[in-house]
Amino acid sequence: MIDIHTTEYRRASFALCLGSFLIFCNLYLFQPMLPLMAVHFSVSATQVNWLVAAATLALAVTLVPWAVWSERIGRRAVMLISLALLPVIGFMMLTVESLLMLSLSRALMGAALAGFAAVAVAYMAEEFTSRALMLAVGGYISANSLGGIAGRISGGFLSERYGWQGAVVCMAVFSLLVAIAIYFLLPEQRNFRPVKGQLRQQTYSVLVHLRTPELWQAMLIGGVNFALFVNLYSVMGFRLVAEPYSVPVSWASMIFLCYLSGTVSAKLSGRWTQRFSPVLGMVLGTGVSALGMWVAWYESVVAMVIGLLLISSGSFFTHSLAYGWVSQRAKNAKATATALYLVHYYAGGSLGGFYLIGCWQYFGWTGVIAGGSLLYALLAGLCYRLHAGTEGSADAPLPSEPR
C-alpha cells in the first residue's frame, strides 16, 4: 500500500491531482462564456446553459459504465483512455457551427471526462493506506477547484480575445501534454483484481449502494450541494455582465478566483475527519455556503466577492467530506460507489442550472435567493438525516493509521 511521505505517494498524488485539474479545466471552459455565447447564438440564458449542462449531464450518465468497465480492465487503464480522448474531441469541436451541435460535442466531452472522474478515488482507495487516502482525496478535490479556476478564467479571457474556437484549441493542446505526463507518472496498480463476466454482480452492487442509507444520503448531499455551488457562480456571471455593472466577460470570469477558498477548505477537510465527525463537517460547510449566498444579495461587488468566497469554502468542504465518506464506507465495488456519488453530484449541477438560472431569468437575484434558500434547507435536512441514521456508529472521525 502507498503511504504518505514516500516517493511513490508523491508521484501518484501529483499525477491524480494533475488529471483532476485537467478534467475540470475542460468541463468548465465554457461557463464564463455563457453570456457571450448567448449573444453569439441569439438565445436565452437557460438555452445557452446547455453548453455546461450537456457536459455535466453526460458525465453523470456515463460514470457508472466507466466504473463497471474499470472493474475488468483496471482503474489506471480507464483513466489513460479517458485522458487520450480529450484532445481528440476538443479538435473535433472546431468543426461545428450551431448551438445544438456544439452542445452535443460538449456532451461527448463530458462522457470522456467521466472515465477519469469515475475511478480516480477508487484507485486511491485500493492503492493508498487509509491515512494517505483521506489526505489524497483532499488534495485531489483541491485540484478540482484549481482546475475550475484555470478553465473558467482562461475561457473568459481567451474567448474574448480569440473567440471560443481559440479557447478550445488551447485547451486541446494542453490536454494532450497533460495526458502524456500522467502516462509516465501514474504508478501501475498492485492491489487491483479484475472481475470479468460479472455485469449482473456490478448491477447488483449499484442497487446495494443505493439501498444503503448512509451512502445514498451522502450522494444526495453531494448533488444538492453542487447544484447550488456551480450555478450560483453561473448566475453571478450573468449578474455582472448585465446592467448596472456591465463588466466584460473576461473580467467577470475573475470571480472564479474565489474558488481558491474552496481549495484551502477541501485540503482542511482531511484534517477535520481525523478529529471530528464528517457529518457535522457537512453541516458546517452547508451553513457557511448559505451565509455566502445571503451576503452576495447586497448590491456591492465587494459583498459579491465575499459571498462567493464563503460559498466556495463551504461547498468544497461539504463535497470533500461527502465524497470521502462514500469511498470510505462502501464495503465492496468502491469504484461503483464513488461513481454513483458523482452521478448525483453532476446530475445535481446540470439540473440545478436550469433551476437557478431560471430563477434569475424570471425573478432576478431576489428569485435566486428564494430558490437557493429552498435548496439549502433541503441540504440541511439531508445532513440531519445522515447524522441521525449514523449516530453512535459510523458517524465518528475516520481513523488514521499509526505512523
Image: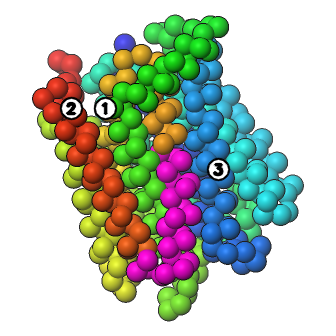
Q: What's the CA distance linking mark 3 and mark 1?
A: 28 Å
Whether the magenta-drawn stretch holds residue 52 is answered as: no
Image position of 105 with respect to 307: above or below? above
Q: Residue at x 56, y 54 (%)?
A: 350
Q: Which residues are magenta?
A: 345-367
Name the secondary structure under disc 1. helix
Q: Quadrant of residue 71?
A: top right
Q: CA distance from mark 2 to mark 3?
A: 34 Å
* Residue 130 in picture, x, y percent from top left: 29, 21
Q: Reading the chain from its start, which is encountered first: label 2 or label 3?
A: 3
For residue 214, above or below residue 236 = above
- Residue 46, percent across and down? 63, 69
Give the residue displayed 45% in from the left and 9% down from the top: 191
Evaluate whether residue 317 shows in this view: no
State which tag comes first along the sequence, 3 or 1: 3
Q: Earlier in the sequence, mark 2 or mark 1?
A: 1
Q: Are marks 2 and 1 in contact (CB under 8 Å)?
A: yes
Name the residue tied to disc 1: 214
Magenta region, main secondary structure: helix
Q: Residue at x 50, y 24 (%)?
A: 206
The residues bearing labels 2 and 1 have C-alpha atoms spaced at a distance of 7 Å
Place of residue 107 in the rendered image (x, y in percent of width and height, measured from the top left): 70, 48
Instruction: Give me the disc on residue 55.
Output: 3
Q: Label for residue 390?
A: 2
Other residues around mark 2 within 10 Å, as few (<14) / some (14–19) / many (≥20): some
Image position, residue 267 (x, y; %): 31, 43
Q: Indicate whether residue 360 is drawn in magenta.
A: yes
Tell me the quadrant of the picture where the C terminus can be found.
Answer: top left
Q: Amino acid at mark 1?
A: Glu
Q: Amino acid at mark 3?
A: Ala
